[in-house]
Every structure is written in structure tokens, then in C-alpha cells.
Image (cartoon, rainbow, N blue to C red):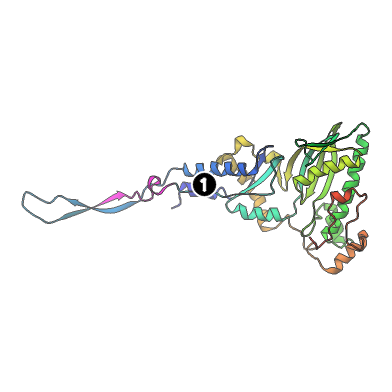
Amino acid sequence: MTTKAARLFRRMDGLFAVYKPQGVHWKLIRDTIESNLLKELNSCPPPAPQLAVKFQLLSSGENNGSKDLILSPSMLPSLANHPLVKGPQFHKVHVGVGHRLDAFSSGVLVLGVGKGNYVLEHLCKSHVTRDYTLEGEFGRATDDFSHTTRVIEKTTYDHVTQDKLERVLAMIQGANQKALITYSQMDLRTQEAYELAVKGLLYPHGKSPPILTGLRCIHFNPPHFTLEVQCVNETQKYLRKLIHEVGLELRSSAVCSGVRRTRDGPFKAENALTRQHWTADCIIQAIAHFRKTTRKIRKSGMYRQTDGQLNSSAKIQEQIRSEIGQSDQEHVELTSPTFDRIVDRVAPGTG
């Protein structure tokens, strides 16, 4: 017979998302959730103790002088499995972490419990698109592109307008679209490639540098501005460097004052659990909410590349290179020298 704690643990199998605050390391969030789940599991009442047959020695009839031993069977509870004897039923609950966020960043962080850790591996290896909101500030540059470290340069920004900013963003997005076509390793002359591109299902095949699939300005109030970014294979350091490169293209400088992830694949910010909801009950409800999504990731591979994208023959690679006009060095050509720092020029198959 299964215990209440065991039934509760089975309900915890799956994926869920939490909202990571800025300035908090992801390891602290993982340890906090593990501790909360473990405390809830071990607080369940223990099962009723099993009864065991015990033979008790009864006092023999001392009055009649008999020396025979008299044993009486009885049913007594066995305390071998009692928590005070055996200890807590659960000693460790493994919580896996998906695509991580550094301490400087905030936003959606996907976690997995139990069998959900295997699904989490599939999600991390697949090329899901993630959305970010980047906050930038013109007029200064730092050694790590964030606004909290040592300032190495100050510049003017009065000449920067929203129209100029949007033109630079359009150039960057165009360069990344060319890189996306290159690393997808699709034959651009096929109907399949056209349909995938129209539906937005064109993803890089294998290893690739960070690629932006969408980039636009949603707020502009110099020196402050905000960008909305959709990307794959990114890191938070790459996104902060992107703000720096935008400043250089505008003949100025810029630092990143905030990185916030608003979506990680099917997990959105509105479904992420905030700190006060990192309890076992809220986590179980969130896992149940995403159970259907978890099954799709496990069974159908909805975020993996299509069969056409898995074709990496030399013939198709040669067709792609001829379509996009690659150089003899098989590098992705960008529209300006600065973009060489935004998109890592690595030929497909060499990563």
C-alpha cells in the first residue's frame, strides 16, 4: 500500500516555471524549492504501523509449583519503520534547472522534478525561442557591458534618434536572419524550406552561435531605451554585449541596465511562480497545468528540428552556400564590420 507521501511525490513529476528575481543566484532558488518540497513530503503523516506477532512470557502458576513456561501470542505494532526510528522517508528531492539565468538577470526559469528532469534535458537541447526585454542606457561603456561595473568610457548621445536606432536594429536583424538560414542547413529552393520560414519554424541545426530571430525597440527616452528580443542559443552576456554593439553602431556607447526573460519556449512570465508561491501546493498545481505540454515535449518532440532540417548532406550545404553567397572561407558575411562581433562567423559543421 502506497503512503500519502509517495502519492504526493508522484504528483510532483513534471515541469514548471518560477520567476527569478534580479540579484538572486539560480542555485539559491533551486535549493529553496528542494527544501520546501522535502519539508512538505516529510510532514505527511506516517502510515499506520504494521502489526507483528509477539510471544509474551506469562507468569506460570507459582501456587501449584509448576515450572512450565507459558507463552501467549499477541499482535503488537512494529515500530521498525517509525520516523523516530528509521528517520524521514525522503532525504533528497532532485530539482533540475533548464536554461539558466545569471545573477544579474531576472525572469522565467524552468525547473523539473522527478521524471520531469528527463523532459527538461530534451527542452534544453532543442532550439526553442526565448523572449527577453533588454534595458539600455546611452552615454557610457563598462568592461563587462553592465551598468554596475567600472566605467571605461563616456560619450555623447544627443545625436541618437529613435529612427536611427530602428535602422540599426533592422540591419542587425537582417544579418541574423541570414545566419539563421545558413545554420538551418535547409535547401532554400524547396517548398518545405519556404513553409518553415513562413511559419517561423526555421531553427539552426546542431551547434550555432547566438542568433536573433526578432529585434525591436519598445521604449525610447534618451539616454534610456528598451529592446524586445527573440533569440536562440543565447547567453545573458551576449545580450548585454548586443546593447554595447548597438551603441557603437550609433557612434556612441551604451550599457545594459537590465535583462529580463519573458518567455522560455512554452513557459511565459504570467505562468511563472513568484517567491511567495514556491510552496509544494502551488508547484503541484503548476506542474499539473503544464502536464500536457510536458507530454508533448517528451513524446512528439514538438520543439525539435523537422526531418528536413536533419538532412546535413554535403549537397544541401553547397546549395545553401551558393544561395547566400558565402565567401571561400565559409563565413557568414554581415552588412558592416561591427556585426562581425554580434554574430560569430563560424561555418556550419565546424562548431
Q: Nearer the viewer, residue 171 or 344?
A: 344
Q: Is residue 305 left or right of residue 35?
A: right
Number of marks in the rendered image: 1
Report if residue 55 lies within the magenta region.
no
> Which residue type does callout 1 highlight?
Leu
* Residue, disc 1: 8
Q: Residue at x 91, y 46 (%)?
A: 171
Q: Where is residue 302 shown, x and y percent of the image?
A: 72, 55
Report if residue 83 lies within the magenta region.
yes
How dense is the environment of label 1, judged by Cα within 10 Å: few (below 14), some, or many (20 and up)?
some
Above or below for 308 versus 227:
below
Q: Which residues are magenta?
A: 73-87
Q: Nearer the viewer, residue 280 or 249?
A: 249
Q: Where is residue 133 shown, x and y percent of the image?
A: 78, 39
Say which quadrant the C terminus sits in.
Answer: bottom right
Q: Is residue 65 left or right of residue 129?
A: left
Q: Is residue 349 left or right of residue 266?
A: right
Above or below for 118 versus 28:
below
